[in-house]
Image (spheres, grey):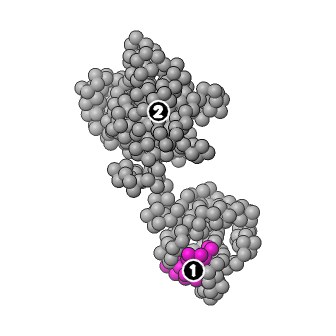
Amino acid sequence: MNIHEYQAKGILEKYGVTIQKGIVADTPEEATEAAKKLNKETGTEWYVLKAQIHAGGRGKGKVKETDSNGVVLAKSLEDVAPKSKAILGGTLVTHQTGEEGKLVSKLLVAQDVYYPGEHEPKEYYVGILLDRAKGCNVIMASTEGGVDIEDVAENTPDKIIKEWIDPRVGLQGFQARKVAFKLGLEGDAFKNMVKFIHSLYTAYDATDSSMFEINPVLKTSDNKILAVDAKVNLDDSALYRHKDLADMRDKSEEDPAEVEAAESGLNYVKLDGNVGCMVNGAGLAMATMDIIKLSGGDPANFLDVGGSANAETVEAGFRIILKDPKVEAILINIFGGIVRCDRVAKGVVEAYKNIGDIKVPIIVRLQGTNAEEGAKIIEDSGLKVTSAIVLKDAALRVKEALA
């Protein structure tokens, strides 16, 4: 589960990670009040205004309606309201949102941390994620902060520092010091980075997260180390242990069809093809998408109804697939193991009648427990639904439907 920057920073601060202070606002008026409060608490006289959306590249992104960037600097209290107004309520387009962009409904008003001092400020990158190949977490760091880490990894991989953490013992002191040393830090900056890494790893481990990405981590002009930005991805499978974190979910940032599917107990991922597919089981879903490709089509989605498919879940699946205007045909591919094929067939017929006026061809392939009974139910229904038994037949029916 993705969360906003301001929420991520709240988690980090809770575990002792030093952050760039900020206050979230919903309106230009609230942004001004937030700036006043920050001025009293931190003494800052410049304010960084950051659009809060689930996408990277906000600083380079543009708000369609005003041409404002998604991250701007207000150099006075009077600048906060007009610059906030140019972002809030607008559609921010970045390299990660696509041309449609995302609506900005919240803004983070943050302190300016690039103040002059004895030393030159320096940006770093620090991330933590699970290395599945090695079965342990890995800390990744780089002196090339403030830029896309993917570009650094591709063009200058030698600048990526990696430190693997044995899950049986956790992060050791020498490992945090090794990372700080390889980043070229010394003195107070070295000590502060070691503390930063320890606190960051504690937060990552305690929240059952799947990824932390702090880019940039800033060494200020007085050698403080703090998180200027924060991207946190929480493990959905562990949210039952963290109700406070689960409550951070912002459904307005997610695909409406995926939200509806989750509420109906379906696993759904929207794709860009023209053939909708409904299956039971992730492995069968992958095979079904292969069939669709071989038949000349492209999968429009991944939709797994699970092992307890019934009329309600099938109908919900139909409705979600049919909301995609690109869908030209629907392939239902069910293997009857836990769920009986005749039960699914009845669900298909019932859902078809309830929805009504389905204009795209539907191919149903049933195999396994009570497959013959299920096929007969489909054939006797009188509906425009084509039945198939083997995968080759299903692929042929899809090809005919797209012709």
In magenta stretch: residue 160: no
Q: Quadrant where the C terminus lies?
A: bottom right
Return the x and y of residue 191 as percentages of the image width and height: 41, 22
Q: Amino acid at mark 2?
A: Gln
Q: Residue furthest bottom?
A: 380
Left or right of 77 on screen, residue 5 = right
Return the x and y of residue 176 as percentages of the image width and height: 47, 29
Q: Secondary structure at mark 1?
A: loop
Q: Residue at x 60, y 43 (%)?
A: 134
Q: Residue at x 55, y 36 (%)?
A: 164
Find disc 2 in the rendering and name its residue.
172
Task: Give whichever of 109, 162 is nearer the camera.
Answer: 162
Q: Residue furthest front?
A: 169
Q: Residue at x 60, y 35 (%)?
A: 150
In magenta stretch: residue 354: yes
Return the x and y of residue 244 as percentages of the image width and height: 34, 50
Return the x and y of residue 153 as percentages of the image width and height: 62, 32
Local crowd at mark 1 within 10 Å, few (<14), some, or many (≥20)? many
Q: In which quadrant of the rendered view does residue 206 lie? A: top left
Q: CA distance from mark 1 to mark 2?
A: 53 Å
Asked if residue 329 is positioned above or below residue 106 in the image, the reply reads below
- Magenta-highlighted residues: 334-356
Asked if residue 191 is positioned above or below residue 289 in the image, the reply reads above
Residue 259 shows up from this direction: yes
Label located before the other in sequence (1 or 2):
2
Find disc 1 in the rendering and name its residue.
340
Q: In which quadrant of the rendered view does residue 81 lie? A: top left
Asked if residue 300 is positioned above or below residue 247 in the image, the reply reads below
Which numbered disc, 1 or 2, marks the residue closer to the eye? 2
Q: Residue at x 28, y 33 (%)?
A: 34
Local crowd at mark 2 within 10 Å, few (<14), some, or many (≥20)? few
Task: Give whichever of 45, 20 is nearer the camera.
Answer: 20
